[in-house]
Amino acid sequence: MGFNCGIVGLPNVGKSTLFNALTATQAAQAANYPFCTIEPNVGRVSVPDQRLDVLARLGQSAKIVPTQLEFVDIAGLVKGASKGEGLGNQFLGNIREVDAVAMVLRCFEDDDVTHVGGTIDPVRDADIVTTELMLADLESLEKRLPTLEKKAKSGEKDAAVEAAVMARIVDALRRGEPARTVEVSGEDAQIVRRMQLLTSKPVLYVLNVDEGTAASGNELSRTAARMAEAQGASSVVISAAIEAEVAQLPPEEQREFLSDLGLERTGLDRVIEAGYGLLDLVTFFTVGPKEAHAWTVRRGSKAPQAAGAIHTDFEKGFIRAETIAYDDFVTYGGENGARDAGKLRLEGKDYLVRDGDVFHFRFNV
């Protein structure tokens, strides 16, 4: 089960530089001209989790396997993308396929790096990207809604329900509000997911500052952070240039380099963790002598779905899940101690996975 986060934004805001740093590769060509990223680059990154090291030590595991998150570097968008300007159609197609959006906003001045808008204004840039996505969604729904309404009038109940949900979203888009601002739950939420709307995806704002303000941010990033807060969205301040440098250093030199800049940890760790949280994921673990492994499922997943994240056969033949909470696993020194203390539980098919659960699945195929 893979989860991915699309890195989007205007050209020359630092998307590809950030992607290169995230994946510690030069897979994405970073250049000072628009559309240097033509095909979306995809990279998988490990999600930092100190619990995994603790579990590996207690389980005397020979190998540690962290859970991963996928980042997709998508070509820069320009005003008019919803009408096909620049690489508009390709951009919109690529972003439609991701689970969440990390929108990079330029919060630094640099005469050597051209900005397509002529001036540096992260709030304006965010508005441009969001507006293009909303226009694309609105155009798509306005084409589909009349057909649904016609079916609804002919007595098709499912069409009536879907048309009502779609009409609410169309009204929001016409007011200049993204689809994600429309509150839906249950079956309505399923209907919205099937619409594959660009603006229904959760957004993380990545505020890209210059090297000198990486530790504290600057007025541009603070303005952008206030915008994100007003939307109920998260934001992370980083310097993509610094992160690219750090990614090329040996691990033992990274801490000293960051310390000299007044940073306790990499911005990449914070971006990865924020992206993970944005997708509303939870981590569970399997621990044994061969490996301690972190796995990912969406919050609200049941035990068989967690088993299926490991192997489809585990879900098909699911019998039960031997479950120990992370804190109990640590407190009692591992699986045997937790079992002796009565902290190992047998959970069935309806058990909702909790973050930090340590599982041993029983199955029959």
Image: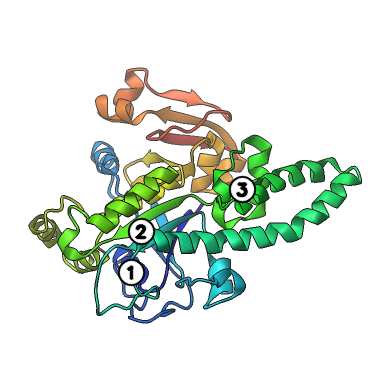
Residue 69 position (above or below residue 321): below
According to the image, label 3 marks what residue?
172
69 or 304, which is in the foreground? 69
Residue 114 position (above or below residue 225): below
Q: Which of marks 2 and 3 is in front?
A: 3
Name the element at disc 3.
helix
Mark on residue 14? 1
- Is residue 65 visible in the rendered image? The answer is no
Q: Residues within 10 Å of mark 3 (few under 14, many from 20)?
A: some
Residue 345 position (above or below residue 296): above
Q: Residue furthest top?
A: 342
- Is residue 137 visible in the rendered image? The answer is yes
193 or 256, which is in the foreground? 193
Residue 280 position (above or below residue 332): below
Under mark 2, the amino acid is Val
Q: Residue placed at 41% from the left, 57% from the top?
A: 102
Picture coordinates of residue 336 (x, y %)? Answer: 32, 27
Q: Which of marks 1 and 2 is in front?
A: 1
According to the image, label 2 marks what residue?
45
Under mark 1, the amino acid is Gly
Picture coordinates of residue 220 (x, y %)? Answer: 28, 58
Under mark 3, the amino acid is Ala
| Left or right of residue 110, residue 12 in this image | right
In three-dimensional space, the C-alpha distance between marks 2 and 3, rounded to whole angstroms, equals 35 Å
In three-dimensional space, the C-alpha distance between marks 1 and 3, rounded to whole angstroms, equals 31 Å
Q: Nearer the viewer, mark 1 or mark 3?
A: 3
